[in-house]
Image (cartoon, grey):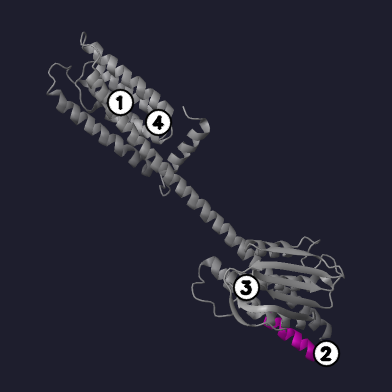
Amino acid sequence: MPPAGGRGARRRAYAALVDRPGHPSRWSDLLPAAALPAVVGTVVLAGSFAAAGGQPEARTLDSVGVALLLVGPVALMFRRRYPPAMFAVAAAAAIGYLGLGYPYGPVFLPSLVALATAVTAGYRGSAYILTGLAYGTLVALHMARSPGGGVPLGGALGWLAGLVAFVAGCELWRSRRERLAQARATEVEAQRRRGSEERLRIARELHDVLGHHVSLINVQAGVALYLMDSDPGQARDALAAIKQSSGVLLQEMRSTLGVLRGADEEPPRHPVAGLARLDDLVADNRAAGLPVTVDVLGVRRELPPSVDLAAYRIVQEALTNTRRHAAATGAAVLLDYGEAGLTVQVDDDGNGPGGPAGTGNGGSGLPGMRERATALGGSLAAGPRAGGGFQVRARLPIVSRTATSPAGSA
């Protein structure tokens, strides 16, 4: 017999194919379970009564014979729960029927169906042992009913060849069903993994968007409150910046939530986050009181969308956390377009706790940036600089690149 682990796996594969979803009640399960036994029982009874007419020497098919013919089809009602026991009952009923001298006919049809069910359900060892016992018993029974005739080699070999062919067909069927079950399980796992990856991506987007814009709103609100009486004009500018940041935040949140609802089927009407919006990001940080410089080395390229978005979000998150945690007086952004990829570096001169990635205070900024980089096959390093301050440096590989314009500085 096969090992328990392998048999259990095969039984689970069989159950995954037989117990399909979409059956809301027990009655919907009972109908297909009873349909096959009803068909088999009808064929067995009709065939046996038809065959009895050509076998006058056989015992008359009475109520006992009919009951034995119906045992196998009734046992098939339990084929999903007890395949080996069902096969044993069906085979024993057929052997008992023939042993009592009733006429030959399609009496073994329930046993063959039970054998196929047991094999495909993973009970191959039990099924083969029972098949061997049943076959040997039938040969012995035939010899007992024909004393002096010797071993019926021709008939026995014919039965054996037919039985081997039937078992081979069952094995092919079992193999196909297991492959289908494995393919279905693989697809379910792939869908689950894609769902997890999409949830993680959306969580990173929400974290970066909310962190950046809420931080700007918080800073500008503090400026407005502080200058409300002494400098109403600058307070008004701060409120205008709050309005602009909150509008952009609402736009990006609608876009992200639209993906969650499946409603974002049309192309977005506002610019997609990427390095093309770096100037706006720098302007927002300067308006919030953090001077930022940008240097670009190498030759500007049109980046793949995933790399473009990751580069922008890394810069955005690094500047956001510099503003919130580093107590810096300035930050520098470096974009280095190399042959193999893009290097994104953000330095600050701060000395606040936690650094720009929010390390030390339980923040998720640094893990989120590292996840973005590693998801593209790149890497990210972050830590204090030798001369003071903090540095975030990410290397992002570029798969397809198109040169556009010489580099410059902003």
Of the numbered discs 2 and 3, the one sitting upstream in the chain is: 2
Label 3, label 1: how many angstroms apart (C-alpha)? 71 Å
Give the extent of the magenta segment. Answer: 230-246
Confirm whether the magenta stretch covers residue 238: yes
Residue 79 in sight here: no
Residue of label 2: 231
Label 4, label 1: how many angstroms apart (C-alpha)? 15 Å
As rendered, which of 14 and 161 lies closer to the eye?
A: 161
Of the numbered discs 3 and 4, the one sitting upstream in the chain is: 4
Residue of label 1: 71
Residue 126 in sight here: yes
Tell me, for residue 83, which label it has, or none: 4
Of the numbered discs 2 and 1, the one sitting upstream in the chain is: 1
Residue 46, percent from left and from top: 18, 31
At label 1, the amino acid type is: Val
As rendered, which of 195 and 166 lies closer to the eye?
A: 166
